[in-house]
Image (tube, grey):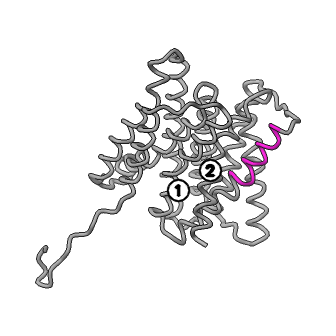
Amino acid sequence: MNLSLYLLTVLIWGTTWIALKLQLGVVAIAVSIVYRFALAALVLFVLLLVTRKLQVMNRRGHLICLAQGVCLFCINFMCFLHASQWIPSGLVAVVFSTATLWNALNARVFFGQKIARNVLLGGGLGLLGLGLLFWPELVGHSASPQTLLGLGLALLGTLCFSAGNMLSSLQQKAGLKPLSTNAWGMAYGAAMLSIYCLFQGIPFEMEWNTRYIGSLLYLVIPGSVIGFTAYLTLVGRMGPERAAYCTVLFPVVALNVSAFVEGYQWTTPALAGLVLVMLGNVLVFRKPKPLAVASSGKLA
């Protein structure tokens, strides 16, 4: 069962990046995000109400859900979709995989957790790998300010995602389960973006074709509802550290899909960079070996 959930999470979240790119077109980026998370929130609320698992939250819980919605289901997706206009979706997924590193740093800043040596080493490998992945575009004929802008937006989106993780951690420490907080967070995120669209005069258009509707439904049901459910089930069964190994494989799936759909060209530096990013993530999640303790109580 665990293996099936693991593979399901990797395949779904490793392919949502190309679905995000397919959303680009007639419908404004902000409106596409509103459609996705408004529908996903509706589905989650229906499921939680039918199963009677929707938790009641106080004012503090709702305020944190609001902040979580802005970070997880609003700003970061705005950054990712805008970044996909200038860099391949597979590379956006690789940048996103560095969320593990940012989570470690943010946990240090906000919760005072010590950063282990393996995290620092993994972070260095990850940054080196990103440099190799983007090296052909930065030094080749395709190098442009838009490439750097796309990279910057992808990194900003990842930072917002990490901030949302910290807020979710606060909620779980208060006894609130992720399914309920995600439902409210998605609803708040969609509401905030709707207000933004109204103030900016962005029309709520709809692109009635197979490409847009199909990608939207994929992002709503598999990408948001099933993907989060499968991942959170893994967290409960395997623990958060082992479950988080899913993120190491996302770029492998995403870049291969990008190569098939978008014509992304693999190069030797890019392959080496991908390996370094994956090794960096593995090091981040590697548990340090405990020191053996002798029967006398002294360190062996």
Main SS, magenta region, reads helix
| Residue 130 versus residue 10 in the image, above or below | above
What residue do we see at 77% from left, 24% from top?
201
Question: Residue 79 sits in which quadrant?
Answer: top right
- Residue 108 part of the magenta-drawn span: no
| Residue 291 versus residue 215 in the image, above or below | below
Q: Residues within 10 Å of mark 2 (few under 14, many from 20)?
A: many
Question: Residue 54 sits in which quadrant?
Answer: bottom right
What residue do we see at 48% from left, 31% from top?
267
Q: Secondary structure at mark 1?
A: helix
Contact, CB < 8 Å: mark 1 with mark 2? yes
Is residue 84 at least partly visible in the picture?
yes
Q: Which mark is residue 98?
A: none
Question: Residue 52 sits in which quadrant?
Answer: bottom right
Question: Looking at this rendering, what residue extends furthest in the right direction?
Answer: 208
What residue do we see at 65% from left, 56% from top?
227
Alpha carbon distance from label 1 to label 2: 9 Å
Q: Mark 1 is on which residue type?
A: Cys
What residue do we see at 51% from left, 29% from top?
151
Question: Which residue occupies the foreground of this view, 67 or 150?
Answer: 150
Q: Residues within 10 Å of mark 1 (few under 14, many from 20)?
A: many
Question: Which residue occupies the foreground of this view, 169 or 59?
Answer: 169
In the picture, measured across the screen, residue 160 lies left or right of residue 294, that is: right
| Residue receiving disc 2 | 13
- Residue 213 part of the magenta-drawn span: yes
Magenta stretch bounds: 211-223
Q: Secondary structure at mark 2?
A: helix
| Residue receiving disc 1 | 246
Q: Position of residue 6 (x, y in %)?
A: 58, 63
- The quadrant of the image that shows the N terminus is bottom right
